[in-house]
Image (tube, helix red, strand yellow):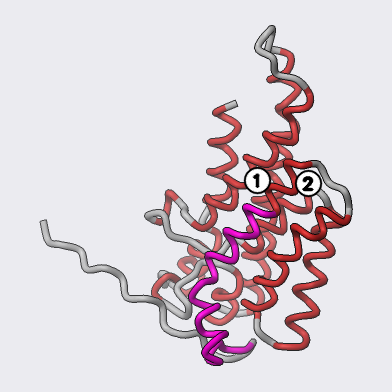
């Protein structure tokens, strides 16, 4: 089981945005725009095509993490013996795998535990767990973006909506807990955006991002 969870984290930690920006422009995207490695910062820094690629791969990371746990659970069950492991544990394993994929995206081991805000990866997790909830959250995001032109606001409201949508569609308790914990984590990752939203300074789609926070200086050896 530990191997499945490690694999879920590593899937999430694949640094798509960093690699795309490095490969196409030779830059460390963490030093540009908002400093994030997600599709929104790639859009503002590199362009539309690369941003779509990053979004698609980051979404796939979340989906694969859950599907991997789902596919391998029968093997765990077959070798469980008298350990007490039953089929009822499968959604719990999927939940933890999904959360680890979110963590991996935002705290990638390959990038010194930096990364993005886990929005696309979270959508991928939701697609694997409960696609109606994923589509509902995507609808909230699209509606908010259409009205406000603020990507972060759409992401925050979509993250909050996932828990409500899980309840309305009567999803299993582990999925509801993932929506609450994962949605809360995504909102927490947007705390800087929340401050700018409250101050009225958050950039709209098409406007430049605020500068990334200064990186701590490295002490010379």
Q: Are marks 1 and 2 in contact (CB under 8 Å)?
A: yes
Q: Secondary structure at mark 1?
A: helix
Question: Residue at coordinates 75% horizontally, 57% vertically from top-left?
Answer: 163
Q: Quadrant of residue 68?
A: top right
Disc on res. 211: none
Percent of width and height locating residue 51:
63, 72
Magenta region, residue range: 180-204
Percent of width and height locating residue 142:
78, 76
Q: Is residue 185 magenta?
A: yes
Q: Does the magenta stretch mainly form a helix, a strand or a loop?
A: helix
Q: Nearer the viewer, residue 40 or 155?
A: 155
N-term-proximal mark, 1 vs 2 = 1
Q: Quadrant of residue 119?
A: bottom right
Q: Nearer the viewer, residue 191 or 132?
A: 191
Image quarter hosting the N terminus: top right
Percent of width and height locating residue 14:
53, 52
Q: Is residue 137 magenta?
A: no
User: Which residue is identified by label 2?
Assistant: 129
Q: Residue furthest top?
A: 82
Q: Secondary structure at mark 2?
A: helix
Residue 217 appears left or right of 195? left
User: Which residue is identified by label 1?
Assistant: 98
Mark pair 1, 2: CA separation: 9 Å
């Amino acid at each position: 089981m530990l191997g499945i969870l490690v694999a879920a984290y590593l899937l999430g930690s694949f640094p798509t945005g960093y690699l795309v920006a490095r490969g196409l422009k030779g830059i460390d995207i963490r030093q540009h725009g908002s400093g994030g490695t997600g599709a929104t910062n790639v859009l503002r820094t590199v362009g539309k095509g690369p941003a779509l690629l990053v979004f698609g791969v980051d979404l796939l990371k979340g989906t694969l993490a859950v599907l991997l746990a789902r596919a391998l659970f029968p093997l765990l069950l077959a070798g469980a013996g008298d350990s007490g492991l039953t089929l009822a544990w499968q959604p719990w394993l999927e939940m933890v795998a999904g959360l680890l994929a979110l963590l991996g995206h935002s705290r990638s081991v390959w990038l010194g535990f930096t990364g993005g805000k886990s929005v696309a990866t979270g959508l991928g997790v939701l697609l694997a767990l409960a696609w109606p909830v994923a589509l509902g959250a995507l609808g909230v995001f699209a509606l908010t973006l259409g009205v406000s032109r603020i990507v972060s606001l759409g992401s925050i409201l979509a993250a909050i909506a996932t828990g409500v949508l899980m309840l309305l569609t009567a999803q299993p308790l582990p999925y509801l807990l993932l929506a609450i914990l994962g949605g809360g984590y995504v909102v927490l990752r947007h705390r800087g955006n929340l401050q700018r939203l409250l101050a009225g300074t958050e950039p709209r789609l098409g406007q430049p991002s605020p500068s990334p926070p200064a990186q701590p200086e490295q002490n010379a050896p």
